[in-house]
Image: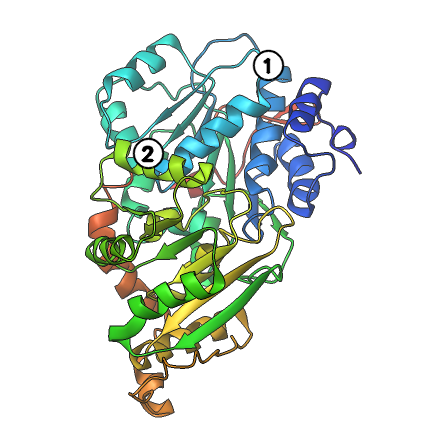
């Protein structure tokens, strides 16, 4: 099957071909026809499998060829958890829509609002936004949702967790009830699926891989090491393996800063990226990393979602994430678009419960690799202790999510008719929209 067989226009197929793609991925093959038909969709697929195109392409098709006059009101709203992902989705909209008469804009926090307001005043068909900045602009009367046809929640599990749910509810209350709603992510817990159901009407579920699974294209390894020797081991791995590039994840902003200073002192080109950095500094670091000028990007989990870095060979979990699902997103920055990659987790004794929680989530054991000279002196906690400390339950996940929410909520965040078979579909269950 090719993209034309999915019902996409020649202009869209040409734009896709320009990007070097000739055959749709499984998530695209399954989701694009459903979105074109106007269905609400809950889609889960592994990272790096083309989820963005799976919703951008059919939305552009419908906006360009289904519906009335060009009002330049917001007809599609895409909500994302981070500024970087918002910018990336906007670029995809520009690339795929280059031959269409559609306008788009992106709004997020951390930068001046004036250019974003000017773009909105010119009129846009597609708006990509982080929740915080969008609410600010909406409260100023700068956004008109009366013509909205499609709402997309990208990285929907994060959008619906404790860090964003209140903002999401406020935004949804502003939207037309009769609209198409799409939710895409690589991970969906049972709780998130239940919550998502309250925003979807007769949704079609699309699952192209086991829930919360990691791609087989990524080789996963864990390195036992004392906590105080993690940075020393990372530098050893960089030198011994002659890594060309690596994306390194730390749990905290201060930890990312400290590690960046250590690896720079060891002679590596590195920069930290996290919520305390200005947006210009974050974008500059990301751009130099993508271009290959920067060898190491030391990041918090703002870089774990959606960022598409071509041919990234190595991902390092300097600190394991507190929420096991975030591990799937982190290692998904490599092994994308059919390429292979490697994931390296530095695991001290106190990290073992987190590692076991990750292994339960992905339903596989991660091989331990002992590096000579870095044998840990401490011992892992007993299984009983590990079980008590492991974030297995949804309550434990909620606590860790609430702890992260305070720094994430504002710092990184900144329904018209549905066509089915050429007819306008009046949605039942409208009261369930919240």
User: In terms of depth relative to the viewer, which is nearer, 204 or 367?
Assistant: 367
- Residue 401 seen in the figure: yes
* Drawn side of residue 41 relative to residue 293, left or right: right
For the N terminus, give its image quadrant.
top right
User: In terms of depth relative to the viewer, which is nearer, 212 or 377?
Assistant: 377
Q: N-terminal of the two: label 2 or label 1?
A: 1
The residue under label 2 is 284
Q: Where residue 353 appears, x then y in whole percent?
A: 36, 79
User: Looking at the picture, does residue 1 appear above or below residue 248?
Assistant: above
Q: Where residue 321 appears, x then y in whole percent?
A: 35, 64
Report the residue at 45% width, 40% height from top.
292
Report the residue at 48% width, 78% height from top.
369
User: Looking at the picture, does residue 309 appear above or below residue 394?
Assistant: above
The residue under label 1 is 100
Helix, strand, or loop for circle 1?
loop
**Which mark, residue 279?**
none
User: Looking at the picture, does residue 70 appear above or below residue 151?
Assistant: above
How far is the residue under mark 2 from the one under mark 1?
A: 30 Å
User: In terms of depth relative to the viewer, which is nearer, 59 or 383?
Assistant: 383
Total marks drawn? 2
Helix, strand, or loop for circle 2?
helix
For the C terminus, give its image quadrant.
top left
* Drawn side of residue 125 relative to residue 394, left or right: right
Q: Where residue 247 appears, x then y in whole percent?
A: 41, 52
Q: Where residue 21 appears, x then y in whole percent?
A: 68, 34
Report the residue at 61% width, 55% height from top.
340
């Amino acid at each position: 099957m090719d993209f034309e067989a999915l019902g996409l226009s020649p202009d869209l197929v040409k734009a896709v071909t320009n990007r070097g793609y000739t055959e749709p991925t499984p998530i695209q093959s399954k989701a694009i026809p459903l979105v074109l038909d106007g269905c609400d969709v809950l889609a889960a697929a592994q990272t790096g499998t083309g989820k963005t195109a799976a919703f951008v392409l059919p939305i552009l098709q419908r906006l360009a060829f289904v519906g009335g006059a060009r009002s330049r009101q917001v007809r599609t709203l895409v909500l994302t958890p981070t500024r970087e992902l918002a910018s990336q989705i906007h670029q995809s909209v520009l690339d795929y829509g280059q031959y269409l008469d559609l306008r788009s804009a992106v709004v997020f926090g951390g930068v001046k609002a004036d250019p974003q307001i000017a773009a909105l005043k010119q009129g846009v068909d597609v708006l990509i936004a982080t929740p915080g900045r969008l609410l600010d602009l909406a409260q100023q009367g700068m956004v008109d949702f009366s013509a909205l046809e499609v709402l997309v929640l990208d990285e929907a599990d994060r959008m619906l967790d404790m860090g964003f749910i209140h903002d999401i509810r406020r935004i949804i209350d502003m939207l037309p009830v009769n609209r198409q709603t799409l939710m895409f992510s690589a991970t969906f817990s049972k709780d998130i699926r239940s919550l998502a159901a309250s925003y979807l009407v007769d949704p079609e579920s699309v699952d192209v891989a086991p829930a919360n699974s990691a791609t087989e294209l990524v080789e996963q390894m864990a390195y036992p090491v004392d906590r105080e020797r993690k940075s020393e081991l990372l530098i050893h791995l960089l030198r011994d393996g002659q890594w060309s590039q690596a994306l390194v994840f730390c749990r905290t902003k201060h930890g990312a800063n400290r590690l960046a200073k250590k690896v720079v002192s060891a002679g590596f080109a590195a920069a930290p990226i996290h919520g305390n950095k200005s947006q210009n500094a974050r974008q500059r670091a990301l751009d130099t990393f993508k271009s290959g000028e920067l060898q190491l990007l030391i990041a918090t989990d703002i870089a774990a979602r959606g960022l598409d870095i071509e041919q990234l060979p190595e991902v390092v979990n300097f600190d394991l994430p507190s929420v096991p699902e975030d591990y799937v997103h982190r290692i998904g920055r490599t092994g994308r678009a059919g390429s292979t990659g490697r994931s390296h987790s530095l695991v001290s004794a106190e990290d073992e419960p987190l590692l076991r929680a990750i292994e339960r989530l992905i339903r596989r054991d991660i091989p331990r690799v002992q590096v000579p000279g870095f044998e840990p002196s401490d011992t892992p906690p007993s299984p009983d202790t590990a079980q008590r400390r492991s974030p297995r339950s949804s309550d434990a996940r909620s606590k860790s999510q609430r702890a992260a929410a305070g720094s994430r909520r504002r710092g990184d965040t900144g329904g018209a008719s549905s066509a089915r078979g050429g007819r306008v579909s009046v949605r039942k269950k409208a009261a369930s929209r919240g």
